[in-house]
Structures are given as structure tokens and as C-alpha cells.
């Protein structure tokens, strides 16, 4: 039974933002203490064709429950694929993984010591993952299909160890920034405002995204405006940053017009930005960490969880977080009620959840001999289809995925797959 102290969805989002929004430069987010809850119940029906049909197990290693969506994605994947306890293992990295590389090796050594484990999905593949996987290869050789998601170590080094690597396309021309601008244009944007602060703009990837956004906007005849907001780590803290967005965004709409799209590089900016975009009728193409959970429920006054009417053995009421499809429906309904339909969008699922499911599914197909067995060769049609089906099962939306191999300093790594998703418009 997966029971833990509740960490509200926004806490998971902010932890995810340590990588996606801030390049690892934000301080850790303290989890919010609240009643014990059950893990979210998965709405989609399991895939019965996998249940008991393959000679092996799938092992999934994620961060702790407070570190992001990946923890939940393991249980979603196990339930949706109909694996059951006899076919699935879920382990978590130590919270202080940077200082506990030896413990990480022990975790993977224990998994690899079970000869029935044929697929290993690691999400996130944090620092020291390579050393732990080296031990797996010593024990098992190529007898196990290893998936890295969101790898933190050198690209060539991880590619030498993993059979499949999955990440957001932040490298091949910074596609996330380019596609975000095109999404804003499709929603009617005539101007794009980029809020950030010097500390973030000193992070190369974040500066690259800004530059690509500017270039893409100008190439399409769209005005790009770069504005400085207070650093949430400055004297005024996060309240100062959020107050600035709350006060400045309406001023910018008055100056630049209602067809102005807004983007902010910090997770804490998203809630006031969504609030003010809805209030002014402006455009919001995406949070910094695209997901229906990121900022939308809080900004729109939608509860992140629902009561089940049951209590646990300690007397706490058991709560259930909204599934993605429930969240999408509630967000869309509330935005429509406020007269802002068609002016806000995001990706239909968090990428961290998608990578776990797609990696496990593809690994099972490898186990069954349905995809290429050679290291470095990936059936892109199968991988794309798996991801698009997952998006539909989770969000109720038929949206596309755009995948391509990493081009690392002129060398294409065919099994290091970068992806972006089509946008879900509310």
C-alpha cells in the first residue's frame, strides 16, 4: 500500500522546476504536511494483453514521493499495463542521492540480482546513475533493457550504458522555445513577453531558450519583449516576485494589447500569471514546466484533491488527487466560465510521467522481441504510437508527440530520443 505524507501537487511541480525551470539553481522545496492519503487511482483500463504474457519483470526506479511526478508515474505505469506484483518492482532513489552513490549501486544491484528482471526504467537518471548501472551490466551484461529518463550525466556516457534515453527537447535547436512561440502565434499572439531575472539568464539553457524565442518571434513578425522581474531568491522573496507579476502583467496588457502572450522562467510566477491572463483576456501558451497540474488548479481555485469518504487506520480522511483527465475537464470548465476559452494552453501530460510509461512499454516490446534487439536501434513508430496512446488515456485528448534523436556536437545518438508534445488548449 502506497501511503505517504501528502505533498500537494504544486510541491511536486516546484521540485520538478528545479531542473526544468531553473537549471538546478533553486533551493529545495519543503513538502507541505497534511493528512495521509492514498496514491491516486488510475482511471484508464489496464492493458490486458501484457498481463502474464511475458517471461520477466519490469523494474522502475524513481525519486521519492516529494521529488516530482515520477514517483506517481511508476504506479500509474504498473496499473495501466496490468503488471501486478509478480511482474513489477518499484524502488526509489535516496533523497540525498548526491551523497549516497553507494546506496544507489546497492539498489540497482538488488534489482539486477533477480534474473526475472528484464526491463529497468530509471526516472530520473540522476547523478551516480551511471556508476549504479555499471554494476547492473557487470551482473547481467546485455540481458536487461535499460531506460534512462531525464539523464543528468554526460550524454555520450549515458548513451553507452542505456538502451533508450528520453528527455524534453532542450538541445536540438531548443525546440521547446521555438514550439512555444509558434503555439502563441496560433492562439493569436501579436507580442510575446518574457519575464525573468539575471540569475536565471546566467543559466546557459535558459538564455538559449530566450534567444530562440526571440529569433522565432521576430522571424514570424511578432514583437518580443524581455522584462525583468524580482528574483524570488532576493530580498522580497517569492511574494515579491508574485506581486510584481500580479501588478505588472495588467499594465503590459494596457500598453501592448490584449493579444500579448506571457511566459515566465520561474515556477512561482505561473500562478499569478495565469490569474492575470484570465482576468485581462491575454494569452498564456505554456507554463515553464508544461503540465495541466502546473499552476492551473491553484490559480483557478480548483482543489487539487477530492475526499473519498473513507478514513485510514489513524483516523485521517483519505484524499485522492485528481487524475489528469479530471484536472483537464475542471480547468477547461472554469476557464470557459470566466470567458477565457482558447487563451491558455499547456502540454496534456507532464513529460516525467510520459517517459516512465513509454520506457516500460517499449522495454516490454523488446522483451517480447517485437522491436529491434540491437543496442542503439529504436523503432520510432512504436515509440511515438505508445506515447500518443498514453496521452489519450491520461488526458482524453488525441494529441501528437514529436521525437527525434539527439544531435550531440555533430554526432547523432539514435537511441537518445528528445521529445516535445502538441499543446492542449483550454
Image (tube, rainbow, N blue to C red):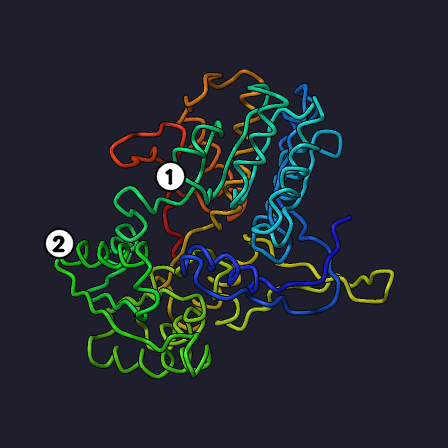
Tell me the quarter of the picture where residue 24 sits: bottom left
Q: x%, y% of residue 74? A: 62, 43
Q: In the depicted view, which residue is nearer to us: 100 or 384?
A: 100
The Cα atoms of the two marked residues, 2 and 1, are separated by: 24 Å
Q: In the depicted view, which residue is nearer to us: 347 or 209?
A: 209
Q: Secondary structure at mark 1?
A: strand
Q: Which mark is residue 390?
A: none
The local crowd at label 1, few if under 14, some if 14 to 19, many if 20 or more residues have their Cα within 10 Å, is: many
Left or right, residue 384 beside residue 184: right
Q: In the depicted view, which residue is nearer to us: 241 or 339?
A: 241
Q: Are marks 2 and 1 in contact (CB under 8 Å)?
A: no
Q: In the depicted view, which residue is nearer to us: 309 or 371?
A: 371
Query: Which residue is rendered at x = 54% and y = 64% of the image?
Result: 28
Tell me the quarter of the picture where residue 290 sits: bottom left
Residue 314 versus residue 43 in the image, above or below: below
Left or right, residue 169 beside residue 254: right
Q: Which residue is mark 2?
A: 219
Query: Which residue is rendered at x = 24% and y = 61% of the image?
Result: 188
Query: Which residue is rendered at x = 35% and y = 44% of the image?
Result: 169
Residue 2 versus residue 367 in the image, above or below: below
Number of disc labels: 2
Q: x%, y% of residue 311? A: 82, 63
Q: Which residue is mark 1?
A: 418
Q: x%, y% of residue 186? A: 25, 55
Mark sitting earlier along the chain (2/1):
2
Q: Quadrant of the C terminus?
A: bottom left
Amino acid at each position: 500500500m502506497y501511503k505517504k505524507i501528502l505533498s500537494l501537487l504544486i510541491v511536486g511541480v516546484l521540485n520538478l522546476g528545479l531542473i526544468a525551470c531553473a537549471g538546478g539553481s533553486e533551493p529545495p522545496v519543503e513538502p507541505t504536511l497534511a493528512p495521509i492519503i492514498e496514491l491516486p487511482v488510475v482511471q484508464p483500463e489496464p492493458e490486458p494483453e501484457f498481463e502474464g504474457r511475458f517471461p520477466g519483470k519490469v523494474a522502475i526506479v524513481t525519486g521519492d514521493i516529494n521529488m516530482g511526478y515520477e514517483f506517481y508515474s511508476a504506479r500509474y505505469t504498473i496499473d495501466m499495463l496490468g503488471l501486478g506484483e509478480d511482474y513489477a518492482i518499484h524502488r526509489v532513489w535516496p533523497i540525498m542521492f548526491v551523497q549516497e552513490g553507494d546506496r544507489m549501486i546497492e539498489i540497482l544491484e538488488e534489482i539486477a540480482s533477480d534474473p526475472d528482471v528484464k526491463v529497468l526504467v530509471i526516472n530520473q537518471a540522476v547523478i551516480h546513475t551511471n556508476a549504479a548501472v555499471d554494476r547492473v551490466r557487470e551482473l547481467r551484461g546485455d540481458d536487461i533493457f535499460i531506460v534512462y529518463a531525464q539523464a543528468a550525466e554526460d550524454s555520450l556516457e549515458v548513451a553507452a550504458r542505456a538502451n533508450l534515453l528520453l528527455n524534453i527537447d532542450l538541445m536540438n535547436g531548443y525546440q521547446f522555445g521555438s514550439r512555444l512561440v509558434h503555439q502563441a502565434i496560433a492562439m493569436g499572439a501579436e507580442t510575446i513577453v518574457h519575464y525573468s531575472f539575471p540569475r536565471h539568464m546566467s543559466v546557459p539553457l535558459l538564455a538559449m531558450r530566450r534567444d530562440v524565442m526571440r529569433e522565432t518571434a521576430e522571424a514570424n513578425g511578432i514583437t518580443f519583449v524581455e522584462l525583468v522581474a524580482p528574483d524570488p531568491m532576493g530580498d522580497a522573496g517569492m511574494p515579491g516576485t508574485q506581486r510584481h507579476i500580479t501588478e505588472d502583467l495588467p499594465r503590459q496588457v494596457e500598453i501592448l494589447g490584449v493579444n500579448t502572450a506571457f511566459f515566465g522562467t520561474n515556477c512561482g510566477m505561473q500562478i499569478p500569471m495565469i490569474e492575470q491572463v484570465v482576468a485581462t483576456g491575454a494569452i498564456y501558451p505554456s507554463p515553464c514546466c508544461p503540465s495541466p497540474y502546473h499552476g492551473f488548479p491553484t490559480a483557478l481555485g480548483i482543489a487539487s484533491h477530492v475526499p473519498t469518504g473513507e478514513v485510514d487506520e489513524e483516523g485521517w480522511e483519505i484524499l485522492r488527487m485528481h487524475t489528469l483527465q479530471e484536472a483537464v475537464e475542471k480547468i477547461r470548465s472554469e476557464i470557459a466560465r470566466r470567458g477565457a476559452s482558447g487563451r491558455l494552453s499547456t502540454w496534456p501530460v507532464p513529460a516525467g510521467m510520459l517517459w516512465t510509461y513509454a520506457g516500460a512499454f517499449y522495454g516490454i516490446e523488446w522483451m517480447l522481441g517485437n522491436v529491434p534487439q540491437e543496442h542503439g536501434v529504436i523503432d520510432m513508430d512504436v515509440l511515438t504510437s505508445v506515447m500518443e496512446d498514453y496521452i489519450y488515456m491520461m488526458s482524453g485528448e488525441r494529441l501528437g508527440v514529436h521525437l527525434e534523436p539527439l544531435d550531440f556536437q555533430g554526432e547523432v545518438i539514435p537511441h537518445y530520443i528528445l521529445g516535445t508534445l502538441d499543446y492542449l488548449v483550454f
